[in-house]
Amino acid sequence: MALTNIKIIPSKTTMENISMLLHKYNLPNNDFMAVPHCTVIYSPDVVPADKIPTNISLPIIVKDSKLTLFDTKDDGIVLVIEFMNSDLSQYFRYLKDTFKFTTKYDEYIPHITIAKNVGKNFTDLPKINFDLVFDKLEIENK
């Protein structure tokens, strides 16, 4: 299947901080450990990577984030780190409007997927007391 995948990558320190938090509280983390990232666009529409402007300032520093659960269409209950960032939201909207990318979701909620299909057995998720820093943008065509 052909697709375009645009994502931002957490810094090494951010990855280490998240990993320590997940291990400390014995939280599932198979998806985070496999490929830590925050998706901006994941679309079956192919636009060559060299045609997509990378007009977003890096690093992106997120001061306020939280562990939470998403109830998704395809992956059941998903443990994520959710945050708001106007630069990412604007970049998402720019990409959708400019390149007419189709995506599964109309609304963009910046997040890092930690683990899919976790069920609903989490009642008291730990607080995140560190900044998230994203220092790399990746654009892939597959």
Image (spheres, helix red, strand yellow):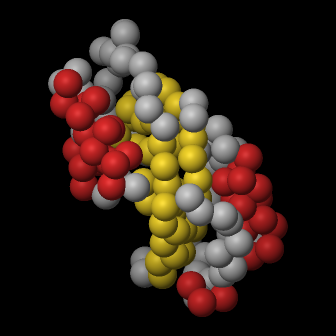
Towards the viewer: 99 or 37: 37
Q: Which residue is at 48% across, 42% downward?
A: 132
Left or right of residue 82: residue 84: right
Residue 115 is situated, as x and y percent measured from the top left of the image, at 31, 39
Compared with residue 99, is residue 14 higher up or lower down, i.e. above or below? above
**How many numbered marks does the figure carry?**
0
Q: Quadrant where the C terminus lies?
A: bottom left
Towards the viewer: 57 or 121: 57
Compared with residue 84, is residue 105 higher up or lower down, i.e. above or below? below
Residue projecting furthest to the top: 123
Residue 133 is situated, as x and y percent measured from the top left of the image, at 49, 49
Determine the image quadrant of residue 67: top left
Residue projecting furthest to the right: 97
Residue 41 in view, yes or no: no
Residue 109 is situated, as x and y percent measured from the top left of the image, at 62, 42
Left or right of residue 14: residue 49: right
Residue 77 in view, yes or no: yes
Q: Which residue is at 22% across, 44% downward?
A: 30
Left or right of residue 90: residue 116: left
Q: Which residue is at 36% across, 18% downward?
A: 126
Q: Quadrant where the N terminus lies?
A: bottom left
Q: Which residue is at 37% across, 17% downward?
A: 125
Compared with residue 37, is residue 23 higher up or lower down, i.e. above or below? above
